[in-house]
Image (spheres, grey):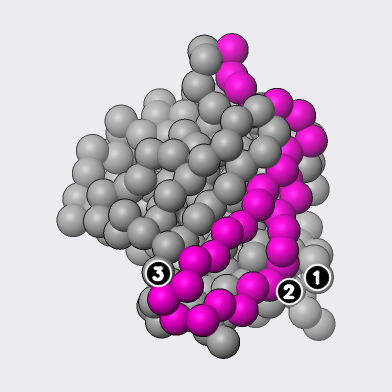
Amino acid sequence: DVVMTQSPLSLSVTLGQSASISCRSSQSLVHRDGNTYLIWFQQRPGQSPRRLIYKVSDRDSGVPDRFSGSGSGTDFTLKISRVEAEDVGVYYCMQKTHWPPYTFGQGTKLEIK
Amino acid sequence: EVQLVESGGGLVPPGGSLRLSCVASGFTFSSYWMTWVRQAPGKGLEWVANIKEDGSEKYYVDSVKGRFTISRDNAQNSLYLQMNSLRVEDTSVYYCVRGNSGSYWGQGTLVTVSS
């Protein structure tokens, strides 16, 4: 199974500052079809997860452009520019290149300083 | 509007069984793979199982193989998870998810396995 490792596991950010979350996979996430199936989710307190980014950098409809994804191969990053109070929650990466099973990172908890 | 509504969770003793349901609306259910993902209290997300549009392919995480069965009824826009031989470690919120990429999630249903 592909192991997804996120860092840091917790993050405290001042409002208006930027935050970056790293996600590393135990093997390359480049699929034989040429796509890289790396997804980012946000889970606000008490809510279900919500997809933010798919295929490394494609933002879902309605997701603010403050959220951006980047990376390739085994190293990926979610960046949140100008952090707002509503960004508090836990962020997960997930791979769907090598399945089953789909595998998630451990989650990164974002809080406001 | 896409909606996924889970039901069927509850308290069950170890070794017991439970059947979860998910009713979908707002999209053509029969055109999508469907997935169950779970989250133990205070823990991260774990993919449990998924099923192809027509039910012809099903996949499971190793820890539930032989105990859980995913199924669907496209006429009823419904997804199911039959859970047998439940263990304490199966205690989680179970989410119904559209597709294989996590585009839409239900609100979840809590399964507690305890004596």
Q: Which mark is residue A51?
A: none
Q: Is residue B86 left or right of residue A61?
A: right
Tell me the crowding category of disc 2: few under 14, some 14 to 19, or many 20 or more residues within 10 angstroms, Cα based.
Answer: many
Alpha carbon separation for disc pair 2 and 1? 5 Å
Residue A97 lies, in percent from the top left, at 60, 28
| Amino acid type, residue under disc 1 in the picture | Val
**Residue furthest bottom in the image:** A113
Label 3 lies in what chain?
A: A
| Local secondary structure at mark 2 | strand
Q: Quadrant of the N terminus of chain A?
A: top right
Q: Crowding near pointer 1: few (<14 within 10 Å), some, many (20+)?
A: some
Rendered location of residue B2, percent (x, y) = 25, 54
Earlier in the chain: of badge 2 and badge 1, it is 1
Q: Are marks 3 and 1 in contact (CB under 8 Å)?
A: no
- The relative height of residue A69 versus residue A64 in the rendered view (above or below) is above
Q: Mark 3 falls on what kind of element?
A: loop
Question: Callout 1: helix, strand or loop?
Answer: helix
What amino acid is found at the position of numbered circle 3 in the picture?
Arg
Residue lying at 49% horizontally and 77% vertically, measured from the top left? A88
- In this image, B112 relative to A90: left or right? right
Instruction: Tell me where the magenta segment starts and ends, as one range.
Output: A4-32
Q: Are marks 2 and 1 on the same chain?
A: yes
Q: Which mark is residue A82?
A: 3
Indicate whether residue A15 is drawn in magenta. Answer: yes
Query: How far, Cα to Cα, is label 3 from label 1?
Result: 42 Å
